Amino acid sequence: MTYAAPAALKPRKRPQQRRATATLDAIFEATIQLLVKDGIARLTTTRVAERAGASVGTMYQYFPHKQALIYAVNEHYLDALAERIESTCREYHGRTAAEMVEAVIDTYWRAKTERPDVTRALYRSVVELDNEALILAFADRTDAATTEMLASASDRSFADVVSVNRTLVTVVFGTVRNSFERGQSGEIAEELRRQLLIMCRAYLEAKMN
Amino acid sequence: MTYAAPAALKPRKRPQQRRATATLDAIFEATIQLLVKDGIARLTTTRVAERAGASVGTMYQYFPHKQALIYAVNEHYLDALAERIESTCREYHGRTAAEMVEAVIDTYWRAKTERPDVTRALYRSVVELDNEALILAFADRTDAATTEMLASASDRSFADVVSVNRTLVTVVFGTVRNSFERGQSGEIAEELRRQLLIMCRAYLEAKMN
DNA sequence: CTATGATATGAAGGATTGTTCAGTTTGAGG
DNA sequence: CCTCAAACTGAACAATCCTTCATATCATAG
């Protein structure tokens, strides 16, 4: 089962010539910059076009409406994030469960804190959307990757890998997000990350068989 | 240190006569109903007034603008939630740490899943706001209550209660929210709750001294 | 060089909606 | 019953902004 974007949110057409991909990139970049700077409430199509060095009409050749633009930007971001996690999972295939957990926490944490302003801006923009498909698609990709990795652990085997995996990813992703929302950073955030790792490892011990 | 609402978001005045409190209640109720039904994007001041059986002008006597209304609704909700958690903390004062964790998870989980549509609607509406004060005030209240409770555990004493506590609440609250966003419910959600409890207890064991 | 489709333009239309305010109604105290 | 402040009304104003489309420019293949 794969989750596709609602028809109404899909792009109108794909760029074919080089300059078209360039303007599309510019539009994406402009959107993120404006989201970071002024938030979604002040994101207008005209401003996006202006900052992208294009005109509104151009934007409307690629997206049927504003929502589709925001959708595309988030999709882009989540795709990149999922790819990073999949990459980590490939890299840690066959290692110990404890190493795996640490690797996933680190990857996710780093991805989210690299550009905190962008992370925050996108978190805030995605709620404006019919984002179910977006979230489910991301969850499915990461679940598949992490489950496969966890099943390959060299030191453990779990009676119910799927449940253990779902628990771990839900906890890790949720914790990072919550820490983020509380505005934690610096030493407090670092400490939390350490504790989260301890917690996950303790869970692995408890689930050993 | 206490977090006050930004001046711009505070109500204009408080009701004095009985009918005034009645209309205020109606406005609150109408706001939530509309948020649930159509989402924040379609929430207009006119519609709120209409459904509340009042006029727009009335609404503007109590709130300087739309944002202040949404702010007030969320504040109301978070206050009630914090109160429930504080109550649980008082009730479990002096019990074992494992019992405490279970109680907090249950309280929070129940509060969030009682009316999932309301929870979701408010999650979505709060990002429109300058919500820092809101979130920090809530975090402070719950942190204080849970820390105090945890420090009273009959079977444990922690070298760093504050850190352990912060970890636990961040993990629990974050996990519930994430589970919520993934649309999990029914048996999968139940299973996750059980696993979360196992995880937290394993963490407590690991932190024992 | 020319033809054709891809790409870009941006003023104008149209619709929505937050907010005000001058005037009316209601309630409570004297 | 009278008075005054509290509470309420809703048409009108003002501002914003999404989206379209007729037109223009550009790139490429033949």
Image: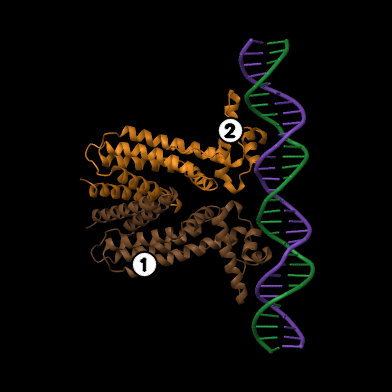
Chain colours: A orange, B brown, C green, D purple
Q: x and y percent of residue B196 in the render?
A: 32, 53
**Between A112 and A96, the one nearer to me in the picture:** A96
**Between A135 and B170, the one nearer to me in the picture:** A135
Residue that carries the numbered disc 1 in the rendered image: B88
For this orientation, the residue located farthest to the left is A209
Q: Say whether residue A149 is left or right of residue A58.
A: left
Residue A161 marker: none
**Between C26 and B128, the one nearer to me in the picture:** C26
Q: x and y percent of residue B22 in the render?
A: 59, 72
**Between B184 and A204, the one nearer to me in the picture:** B184
In this rendering, the answer to whether A104 lies above or below B65 is above
Q: Say whether residue B44 is left or right of residue B160.
A: right
Is disc 2 surrounded by few (<14), some (14 to 19) or many (20+) residues within 10 Å? some
Is disc 1 surrounded by few (<14), some (14 to 19) or many (20+) residues within 10 Å? many
Subunit ID for the residue under disc 1: B
Residue that carries the numbered disc 2 in the rendered image: A26
The residue lying at 64 percent from left, 65 percent from top is B59
User: Label 2 amino acid?
Assistant: Ala
Q: Say whether residue A146 is left or right of residue A71.
A: left
- Residue B176: image quadrant is bottom left
> Could you say whether the residue bearing mark 2 is in a helix, strand or loop?
helix
Q: x and y percent of residue B77 in the render?
A: 49, 63
- Residue B147: image quadrant is bottom left
- Residue C3: image quadrant is top right
Q: Which quadrant of the figure contains the C terminus of chain A?
A: top left
The answer to whether residue A130 is visible is yes
In this rendering, the answer to whether C8 lies above or below B26 is above
How much space separates mark 2 and mark 1, taking CA atoms? Answer: 52 Å
Q: x and y percent of residue A184 in the render?
A: 42, 52
